[in-house]
Amino acid sequence: MSEPTVANLSVRTESKSSLVSPELRILLEDVHLSFGGRPVYRKLSCGFPRGKISILMGGSGTGKSTLLRLVAGLVRPDSGRILVAGEDVTELSERELYRVRERIGMLFQHGALLDSMTIFDNVALPLREHTQLSERDIGAEVSRRLTAVGLPDTEALMPRQLSGGMLRRAALARAIISDPEIVLCDEPFSGLDPVNVRRIERLLVELNSRLGITLVVTSHHIPSSLRMADQIVFLVDGEAISGTPAELRVSTDERVREFLDAERDDEPAQPGAHA
Amino acid sequence: MQPSATRDLIVGLFVAAGLAAIGYLSIQVGGLSYKGPGGLRLYAVFDEIGGLKARAPVEIAGVTVGQVVAIGLDPSMRARVTIDVDPSLKLPTDTTAGIRTSGLLGDQFIELEPGAEDATLASGEEIAMTESALSIERLIGKFVHDSGVESK
Amino acid sequence: MRLTAVETLGFRTVTLIAHLGRITGFIGSIFVHSVRPPWRVRRLVGEVFDIGVLSLAIVCLSGATVGAVLGLQGYTTLSRFGAANSLGAVVGLSLVRELGPVLTALLVTGRAGSAMAAEIASMLTTEQLDGLRMMSIDPVDFVVKPKALAMLISMPMLNALFICFALFGGYIVGVKLLGVDGGTYITSMENAITWSEDVAGTLLKSFIFGALVGFIATYRGYTATPTSAGVSAATTGTVVVASVTILLFDYVITALWGV
């Protein structure tokens, strides 16, 4: 199978010079959230700069996935502000959120493709629902995206016929088909073998470098995170510690150290714990 | 099943079969309405109509020739039934209209027994000879009364 | 802190009312989506296939069997009074007024209602519904609406088919096996059953039952706990709640219809 490239994706006109001044495209301020009496976040504040790759890390249960869902408006916080592309999603109705989500693509941990439809129909769905493109044009767009993620011959297959890595790449094709400016990825590397981890890592990096997409990725795969990230946000004790990979690597905060050291020790024997 | 012409065809067949079943039940079994010719309106007055209802059939010798259109009271407090029958019928003026029950559990209907006169009924006229519905209570009362009289 | 009995009762009542409020909101939202485009005809056709066509086998088989049993039982009882000629009427009336709509609804609940709840609940668990939201597609419009409408459409037709198969089953037993005259069977049946009193009622009942099963199954799937146990609970809960509700509504409708 050919290596996936981003060469087939549409080229956007926004320039990449925003790398210099990290304007925050997503900002969380003083967010509190509890689930059933258990606090998840206490006064959480962090930001994700436009056009950069931010990796969210933290032990299991620290609320990484929940943070993505907060940004997407799928979960409402108990208090606090969440600004996404200039709008406070905590104040928007479901209908208004649909509007904001047109600029966001989300890659769920297990793809979340509709299992009763073919891969083609899945990837084509956003276009069929929200645009007036002809079937021929839709077919061309879907083909391009699937080829870009390295799945050119999968259009007629059903989701259950794909492996975990392939499923995620197909879901990525779906997430980017409407040319979003922000892509949220929930544990895209979990349960994958090193070859597939590299594949997805390369895809995400190209998405960011060629198209300037703001990426927020949750992960506990340290090596790829340290390679990819422009910024790492470390979630611990309901709060966020942000910094560049270089800064965090030499962090004196013992919670960060504990996490980084523990994960590094486990690395050689890393099988891909999630089946 | 994946979207396909076959699937659409099967669903179409299902819907057709379902509608046909509903139609059968409504029209054939339920007797949705009398669909023969009508236009000859006649009236009949009864002492007792029992369970006769509007749209009940009107029959001659077991053949449906019309239906009951309306039921009301006439000035002398008897039941006045309006029927609508096939205008090609030539009903003698001494025709009898009787209320019968269909089977053991059935609904009531009107049976016309043509008479022998030459003159025939025209639209708007009244059937003079009528037989009211049989009432079980009256039958029993009559039986008791008669046998009571006999035993004296 | 232990709650007193009164506090528990109060809490339960408030929860129940909140629950009813949510269900009403859910049903209202289905209505709103049903009268607005996109019409989703393709998906509707697919759901009618899954709900209607795939239930045909069990409905028709059960119909024929129930009709045969009715024919047998009816004959035994009626011939004792010398009224075997009314077999058609007895079989027909029982089926049209009660057994048809109620049994069809119960069968369809078990087969299609539970499947509907399970499918929606597992879509919830695998984040497919959230995936739809992220594509700015309302899951109620995309998933729930076609299923509920398909159930509403399919139920009266399945009911009619059940009754027809059952009438036939009764015919086979009564006429071919037990010797009732074929013409008498059919005539007594056709005379006893009227549109306004019986057939209209059966259509109304099956329509209402279809709505009930459609709403209950989709609601339970949509609000299930997103775990495997949650999917299972949604499925069994649907069958139980829908079955009881059907029987309750059957009583109410029958009582009101007779007024």
Image: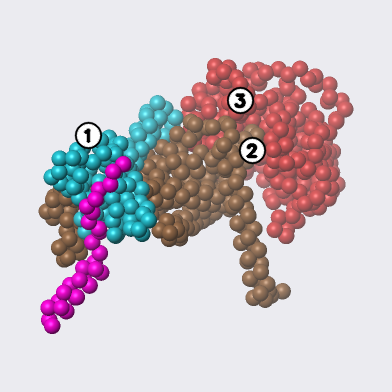
Q: Is residue C59 visible?
A: no
Which residue appears at 82% of the width and 44% of the height? A81
Residue at image mark 2: C133
> What whole-number distance in Å separates the C-alpha atoms at marks 3 and 1?
67 Å
Chain for numbered disc 2: C
Disc 1, SS? loop
Q: Is residue B148 one of those drawn in magenta? A: yes
Report the chain holding disc 3.
A
Which residue: 22% across, 56% down?
B131
Callout 3: few (<14), some (14-19), or many (20+) C-alpha neighbours within 10 Å?
Answer: many
Q: Does the magenta stretch include residue A83?
A: no
Check the rendered structure and report the hue given to chain B: cyan
Above or below A81: residue A172: above
Helix, strand or loop under label 2? helix
Say few, some or many: other residues with alpha carbon within 10 Å of mark 2 (under 14 / 14 to 19 / 20 or more): some
SS for dot 3:
helix
Where is residue A262? Give x, y as percent.
72, 48
Display colour for chain C: brown
Mark toward the viewer: 2 or 1: 1
Per the model, the C-alpha gap separating discs 2 and 1 is 69 Å
Mark 1 = which residue? B88
Name above or below for residue C178 compared with residue A172: below
Give the residues drawn in magenta, as a range. B124-152
Tell me, yes or no, if residue A38 can be seen here. Answer: yes
Q: Name the residue under label 3.
A: A127
What colour denotes chain A? red
